Amino acid sequence: MSVMQGLRLAAVGIAAGTCVLLVLGILQVFGLIDSINADEIPLWMVPFIVVALLAPTAVGLAIAIRQPRNVIAWILLVGAFAIVALTGPDLIFTDGWALQVGRATWPLLYAWPIAVTYVFPNGRFLSRRWRYIGAAGALSFVGFMAMAMFDPEPFYGEDASVPNPMAGNAVGEWLNDSGVGLVWVVLWVGILGSLVAGALAIRMRLRRSSGVERLQTLWLAWAGALIPLGLLLCGLSSFVLGDSLVDWVLFPFLLLMEAAVAAAVGLAVSRHGLYTIERLVNRTAVYAALTVLLIALYAGSALSLGVVIGGGSAWVTALATLAVAVAFRPLRSRIQDLVDRRYARARYEGVRRVRGFEDEVRDGRRAPEEIGPVLREALGDPGADVHFWLPSAGEFCDVSGAVVTAQADDRARTEVERDGVSVAALLHDPALLERQDLLRGVLDASRLTLEMARLRVELRLQLAEVEASRTRIVEAGYEERRRLERDLHDGAQQRLVSLGVQIRRLQRTLPKDAAILGPTLDKIVDEVGAAIADLRQIAAGVRPARLDDGLAAALRDLARSSPIPVDVSVPAERVPTSVEAAAYFVACEALTNAVKYASASKVAVRAVRENGTLFVSIADDGLGGAVVRRGRGLAGLEDRVAAHGGTLTVVSPRGGGTRVEVAIPCES
């Protein structure tokens, strides 16, 4: 048989022994087996005892089966067995001896939970020095129980009539001697010191650990907080509240403490990530402190009001209750803030940073879309990215609106929902999954801002689609203008020219006796020429033919036909034809207004292309005072320019001339 198999069999044997002794004890409580001890355990205490003993036994056995060399498993198994063996079924101890053994062995309820804190979760001490601390603690417990076994002091309370079997023995009297009695104090201080050392060990492990080990240690820290609370209740029962508290409050509490520590160890080993333990520890600390303060407030208020109003008054109770109700919410907020700042510093700072950003968004100083860098700082993850959900497209997009493809890196993904609807997804370091309290706290605080950012991104995409649609409409209109101009030039105009030529040819071939038709034919040819001129003017209004040679050629041709001097400075560089047409019609409208309404004596047309944008300026020295009004020419041109994503600005102070400025994005 191998060593591992032997350890597993030993673990099974200890667990079986604990169960057998527990069953015998229960049978004695129900009177199915005779007991030599007259003292009976109340029936209502049985469930507490069963849970307190079976919890560490089951957890210890489960760990020992998987990891036979794990020290924690043997602490749980031996601890539960020692308790049930020394204080369980009354097989050998009579009344006096049973009471004496119980009085001496009560530290066992604290011994194994404190021992677990020294070596949890890996079964090893923090360092070599901690071995001496553990040995000193074990010596304190063993020495205290050994001396307590020889304690000759009589029993008290309901057991005062039971004689102490150690009464009058020389060893007990010697131990109670004034000189040796100091050993009691030393051992008692050693027990308390071991408790403090256990708390310190957990704190040090929390500081040094991360990831899974941190979550495991937090589980034990949460349950281990019950140990000093049990000692506090023990002290209160002995010195303040009387012995009745032991039977009804203290002993059940100690039993539940045993079960809680064992359950915490089991959860930490097998299901450490199943629950948000950090949030559980946080809430436990908040409400424990809140309960103590509210009780103190109630007692202080009742005492003060009793002095003023008089004891026994219903007003005292009502006003004290009102004081507690009024103080509950602000006190809870203050305690929550203090606990977060002290014990959840990363979460506190992260949430505070997100709240600060939310205030800046509310004040209009920052845009919600800037939430990405804020989350990176709050989570301490420079590689985190935020993707927003687009319900209309059924896909995620980044802050620029670009649809993101399937995740190809090793980052973890956490989705954020609001009212059951997906809002965004955060791609982050997988290590943050082990810090759920920080991750969920920061994301919960940023949920509203993420929703605002998502809506703004979606709105921006919709506006971009509208702008693109407007541009397509303008492009389609422009192409339709070109088609109409070509049809007029190549169709109707050419037919009329051909008709005029044919009429002239017919006129020349007429006989002399038909010369009388000459004036009529001349008139018809003149009308055909006038129709051709009208068609050319209409075609030029639809789209000037010179635009085929570029904006510069079209504007110079326009300047030559102007009744006032026009200075044109336009580069020959070409831009998209639709942009050239928009700029040309703006120049035409501005020049027409300068001639017809502004009484200008000269006009300057300037154009330049910079950084992918065409800038055009038309300035005159006229009367000024021009205003863009709906239904007028400039307003229509403003819409045309806006359809290309550009802007049109009119600067026209009275008496200072008019300057029309246009900026239209164009392809680089």
Image (cartoon, grey):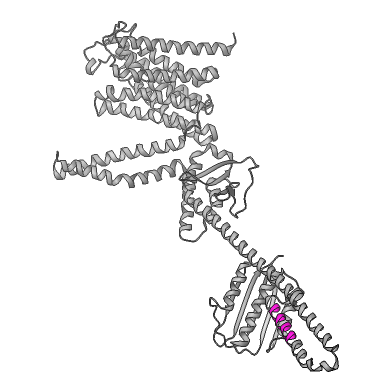
Q: Is residue 42 above or below residue 597?
A: above
Q: Nearer the viewer, residue 540 or 633?
A: 540
Q: Is residue 563 visible?
A: yes
Q: Is residue 177 above or below residue 546?
A: above
Please state the horizontal and vertical placement of residue 660, each as a whole percent of the image.
61, 79
Q: Nearer the viewer, residue 480 or 217?
A: 480
Q: Is residue 133 visible?
A: no
Q: Which residues are magenta?
A: 527-540
Quadrant position of the C terminus in the picture:
bottom right
Q: Nearer the viewer, residue 213 or 201?
A: 213
Left or right for 32, reference 308: right
Q: Nearer the viewer, residue 643 or 234?
A: 643
Please state the horizontal and vertical placement of residue 411, each as a whole percent of the image.
61, 41
Which residue is depicted at the point 33% across and 46% down?
329
Left or right for 142, reference 499: left
Which residue is depicted at the point 39% across and 10% down?
21
Please state the horizontal and vertical placement of residue 217, each as a whole percent of the image.
49, 31
Quadrant position of the N terminus in the picture:
top right
Which residue is depicted at the point 62% across and 53% down?
402
Q: Is residue 538 magenta?
A: yes
The kind of secondary structure the magenta stretch mainly shows is helix
Which residue is depicted at the point 27% across and 23% down?
248
